[in-house]
Image: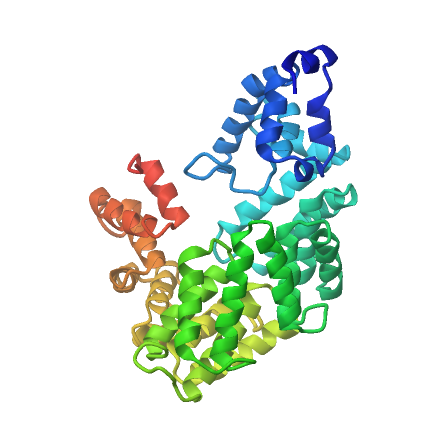
Amino acid sequence: MARLAIDDHNPDIVTIICCNDGFQLALDHNTIKILLRVCKRARPLLSSKMPRFHRWCQSMELLNLEGHLRIGLTPSDQIALSLHFEDQAAADRSWLVAQAEQGNAVVSYFLARTLQVEFAGRQFVRASEREATHSQIFHHLKRAAKASHSMAQFHLAECYRNRLGVDQDHNKAAELYRSLADCGIPQAQIALGRCYENGEGVDQDFDVAIEWYSKAIDQGGQDGRLHIVFLRGWLSFIGHSVEQSDVNALNHWQEVSTQSTDPIIKPIATHMVGWMHYLGRGTFFQFCQMGSDQDWLCSHLMAVCLLLRDGTKEEQKKSAGTLEQLANDGHSDSQFWIGMCYHFGWGASEDYEKSFEWFSKSADKGNSYGQWSVGVCHYWGYGVTQNHAKAFEWLHKSAEQGNRQGQYRLGECYRDYEYMPEDIDAAVLWLRKAADQDFQPAIDSLKELGKWH
């Protein structure tokens, strides 16, 4: 490709990239960068508007520590947004909303992803606020998806799958995943494989699930391979189509836990590795007899997953019932989670006193999350008379066990709360312990104190 030929002809490469959503599928990102470098019209854009756009993203905390966007925008999406960016509009998002209302699919997608990132960083949001935010996200994604924005269609499918701002519809989700998977988009191939793995919107078929995961692998995607490893962990754990083996299950989940970046399977695999060690499954015993311990654990995990993925009201009610039954059996993790159900009205009527009762039972068994919750309840007076001294005592117990929630809240107590002398050194000590576990609120507090490296 000759530089002079392109300069003389002056094709509107920027317009092609901004308006053709499938452009980045045909050309790799390095090729796009070359095209932009040799195109005169793109040079001023790259030297002025893009940096201003990234500074705005940084001010809105949309960049990670490495300076990259935390949301799934392609390079062409970022260029398209920067075309509309004005310095005087940096303080708010009115310019984004205006562009979205005029039918700009990229901006609608960006707004949806921005809301998703911000919402994901907040803790324990009320049901009414959660539903309102999910409705906004769905609205923006649907508008962008109608304009054939592929990643908007992908996230729209996630909304249908997880009942986020719309009634749950696994068939619709699978349909959207399939249309994108057939176009060779690896994220959609993995998602469609997950549908076949779980029997969501399609007949359950582990072989077909592995086929779709393999298609993602064929494109160089590590995630597809790790999804297969994750699935094989479960198959080994339950003895489906293979010999039941706790050792094999543990090995598969350890690989996923250490290598995957997927926000769904990595934490589940990590959780299962922890429980396998805790129960002595796959470590001290090569094969472990199926018994009540596994039964309660599987029931507990299923109930918690349904709560975290915003299942239907019927599913949440069933999950709360399962957790309360397990809590009555004395399982401290279930006691903590049924406390959360009563505190936030997840599948149960909101009742702070019942919530505090269950948190206390969990805390008394040494559960660090139960201790953290009891501390928070004492501090704010949720279901119990406000008592800052007891709050500090329980938060300290939680923090000493390495619980990042307890460490963060204890650090905040040392930082500037009225019921005890301010101790910035102690605050930084505990906030840093939480920050070392990638707890964003603790990182933000350290930044405010000028103590974040």
Nearer to me, 390 or 59: 59
Vertical order, 321 against 34 (above or below): below
Residue 339 horizontal side relative to residue 36, left or right: left
Q: Residue at x 75, y 61 (%)?
A: 172
Vertical order, 19 against 397 (above or below): above
Quarter location, residue 190: bottom right
Residue 209 horizontal side relative to residue 385, left or right: right
Q: Residue furthest front?
A: 1
Find residue 370 and report its horizontal and vertical position in percent: 36, 69
Residue 348 horizontal side relative to residue 159, left or right: left
Question: Would residue 183 be seen by someone viewing this image from the given angle?
Answer: yes
Nearer to me, 73 or 125: 73
Q: Residue at x 28, y 37 (%)?
A: 451
Find residue 49 and report its horizontal and vertical position in percent: 58, 21
Question: Would residue 323 be seen by someone viewing this image from the given angle?
Answer: no
Q: Residue at x 56, y 73 (%)?
A: 348
Vertical order, 446 against 131 (above or below): above
Find residue 364 and report its horizontal and vertical position in percent: 30, 75
Colour scheme shown: rainbow
Quarter location, residue 46: top right
Find residue 140 and report its horizontal and vertical position in percent: 70, 44
Nearer to me, 211 or 309: 211
Quarter location, residue 127: bottom right
Total tally of numbered discs in the picture: 0
Nearer to me, 296 or 441: 296
Q: Residue at x 51, y 56 (%)?
A: 263
Q: Quadrant of the C terminus?
A: top left
Q: Quadrant of the N terminus?
A: top right
